Image: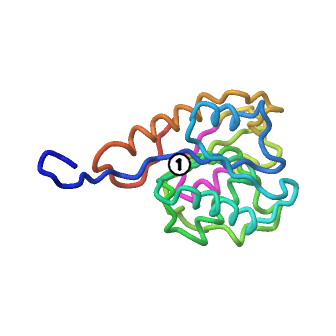
Amino acid sequence: MDATGSQRRHEPSVRLLIVPGLHDSGPAHWQSWLESLHRDALRVRQRDWSDPDLDRWAARIAGTLQRDPGARWIAAAHSFGCLALARLAALHPELPIEAALLVAPADPDRFGVAGLLPQAALPFGSTLVASRSDPWLSLARSQLWSRRWGSHHVDLGDAGHINAEAGFGPLPLAERWVTTLRARLDRPNHAGRVHAVP
């Protein structure tokens, strides 16, 4: 209640959703590091991390979001997790996802799922982080999907698949993105798509 006795309206909280790729993200991975910095972060848990079934993975993301139906979300996805998140956006654009960080997406053609993914801008702002030496997606293909999804594109240079094997570990860019987005989304009367350039 405020001084006039009326109920104050509060925006739902903004939470961080961690969306790993194939085989999950181990303790040395940047996603696990990022999750450890945010006590309210929620991590998607797949039933079978070795089976890249796009619709099943998308459904698990949706189920994870339902654990806090009153929240707004920003998502940090990696590899095949990026594709599952994009698939969910195609199926349910109304979900309360405000923005997504898409790090080293896997090439949809490698899994035969390109036709199941959005072919136009995602229903939320996004930043796509790519590498020039990623064995799972060429830089040119990352730029193509970035344009298609309306994502801000970030080129990390020679960074492999941007995972623990490539030396990530901490990924300060991801933490800057989360911190910037949460601050921006918590401002009263914020509006429009958000990207938060790292």
Magenta span includes 7: no
Looking at the picture, how far across and down is residue 35, in whole percent?
64, 37
**144 to the left or right of 123:** right
Q: Position of residue 184 (x, y in %)?
A: 38, 41
> In the figure, residue 76 lies in which quadrant?
top right
Residue at left 63%, top 57%? 64
**Residue at 52% from the left image edge and 68% from the top image edge:** 93
**Which residue reaches farthest left?**
4
Q: In this picture, is 99 found above or below 87?
A: above
58 or 163, which lies in front?
A: 58
Q: What residue is shown at x 48% (from left), y 34% (from top)?
A: 179
Up-down: is 193 above or below 130? below
Q: Nearer the viewer, residue 85 or 33?
A: 33
> Is residue 146 in the magenta section?
yes
Residue that badge 1 annotates: 74
Extreme residue toward the right, this view: 50
Q: Is residue 71 left or right of residue 171?
A: left
Observer-nearest residue: 78 or 65? 65
Residue 163 image point, x, y percent: 77, 36
Residue 109 in percent (x, y) is at: 79, 63
The chosen color scheme is rainbow
Range shown magenta: 142-155
- As helix, strand or loop, the secondary structure at mark 1 comes to strand
At x 59% / y 30%, what residue is drawn? 37
Crowd tier of the residue under label 1, counting other residues whose Cα lies within 10 Å: few below 14, some 14–19, many 20 or above: many
How many circles with numbers are drawn on the protein?
1
Q: Amino acid at mark 1?
A: Ile
